Image (tube, rainbow, N blue to C red):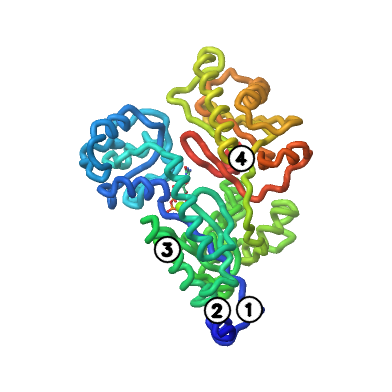
Amino acid sequence: MTCGNTCSRYPHGMSAKSAIRRIAHLDMDAFYASVELLRYPQLSGLPVVIGGARRPQDETLRQTHAHQALARIPLEAFPRLQGYSGRGVITTATYAARQFGVGSAMGLMKAAKLCPQAILLPVDFAEYRKYSRAFKAIVTDIAPLMEDRGVDEVYIDFTEVPGGQREGGRVLARLIQKAIFDQTGLTCSVGVAPNKLLAKMASEFNKPNGIAIVFEDDLIGKIWPLACRKINGIGPKSDEKLKSLGIVTIAQLAEQELQWLIEHFGQKTGAWMFAAAHGRDDRPVVLESEPVSISRETTFERDLHAVRDKAELGAIFTRLCEQVAGDLQRQGYAGKTIGIKLRFDDFKGVTRDQTVEHYTADAKTIRGIAGQCLKRVPLSQRLRLLGVRVASLVKSDSTDKFKENSPPAPVATAQAATDSIVTTSQLF
Ligand code: DCP
Ligand code: MG
């Protein structure tokens, strides 16, 4: 019996010791939009974008059709992008909408020009969080070594899981995909590879509802032809610099000497780029993931001036602090680095932060410190965006930790933005 188990877990007589490292990256497809489509299945196959704050039209839609099931609301009752005016930004779009060139982070007005017939729905974070928790619970039921990487993505260590080695991980990936679909109605894409770096790239290969398997030997054929930007960690700035040095593809990056990369990007980044280009990454899949920071930001309906629009700006600022405090309290965290982020009417951005002695999750305290940060910025120019962020987090259920000077090293990021969720590198 025992032997049977061992043999079926590791085919071809493989023992646990010789199991090769297989790491999966799972990313939900068009996540916010797909969750919306669960309640409005009549929109499936149509271009739908999710973004902006709830508008009067959205309330009307709900109220007018309060008597009937959401799934029966007729298509013509849904608000369209056409004629949208405002500063909202797209969080995500269905694949049907993406064919028109619209996608995450694009202004809704620009999107309205590209695809006026697209249906526009407001964001409903509470609903997305609910499904986020649900799909992660399904994953850990099957494969317990899962690292939470945010609202719609996780890494999973397949190495020791039954089926995790079969067909390079395809069998287990398919099983997880099916379990998520059967229990939530949502699709996802999975990449399975020797490490997190390659798995993250692979999960994009066959999106949506796809699986991609990458082995070490696939580096040259599948990874090297890709643009450097596909490496998670090479952002727009590094990419620009690489391009200016004549490096576009990962193959070109891999041709460079380690020393040359260190000269241009510094010891740490240069060495990391060298390893990444050769497909090397030893980072473990970390079970308990703690957020690095919690933040909210909003783009104003019109540009606001610190003096002329003081009252309006002040109210928005207070509300953002209350929202961040609410997020902290709900998720059970407190922080001691409070920061602000501003974007001016010319799109230039600035950030300021301040670290205080005591951990806090209190809206008034956050507002006070964030207000001091704001005073450190010259505010002659009008503003289009304001954000508030709390970092250096600890779990607030442990009062002892509040007295510690240094919180445990965080390993992941949780972000909640008012009109978009963005990565830490983009925020602040
Ligand atoms: N998101 C956001 N603002 C962004 C990018 C994303 O609010 N600039 C939100 C909406 C997405 C979710 O995060 O649904 C997950 O982001 P992904 O990048 O994984 O995008 P999707 O899941 O929407 O699409 P894909 O199928 O490409 O993964
Ligand atoms: Mg996704």
Image check: 195 left or right of 118? right
**Residue 325: % across, % down:** 58, 31
Q: Quick one: label 4 or label 3, which is nearer the N terminus? A: 3
Q: Quick one: label 1 or label 3, which is nearer the N terminus? A: 1
Residue most toward the top?
Answer: 308
Q: Pointers 1 and 3 in contact (CB under 8 A)?
A: no
Q: Pointers 2 and 3 in contact (CB under 8 A)?
A: no
The answer as to whether callout 2 falls within 8 Å of ligand 2 is no
Dot 2, how many residues are within 10 Å of its Cα: few (below 14), some (14-19), or many (20+)? Answer: many
**Residue 147: % across, % down:** 59, 57
Camera-side residue of 308 and 402: 402
Label 4: which secondary element: loop
* Residue at mark 3: 179
Image check: 113 left or right of 341? left
Camera-side residue of 412 and 93: 412
* Residue at mark 1: 16
* Residue at mark 4: 332
Quadrant of the frame with the N terminus: bottom right
Amino acid carrying mark 3 in the image: Ala
Q: Pointers 4 and 3 in contact (CB under 8 A)?
A: no
Q: Is residue 214 visible?
A: yes
Image check: 169 left or right of 78? right
Label 1 or label 4, whichever lies nearer to me, is 4
Q: Quick one: label 4 or label 2, which is nearer the N terminus? A: 2
- For the residues marked 4 and 3, what is the alpha-carbon distance in whole angstroms? 30 Å
Residue found at x 25% / y 48%: 42
**Residue 373: % across, % down:** 66, 25
Amino acid carrying mark 1 in the image: Ala
* Residue at mark 2: 9
**Residue 171: % across, % down:** 46, 73
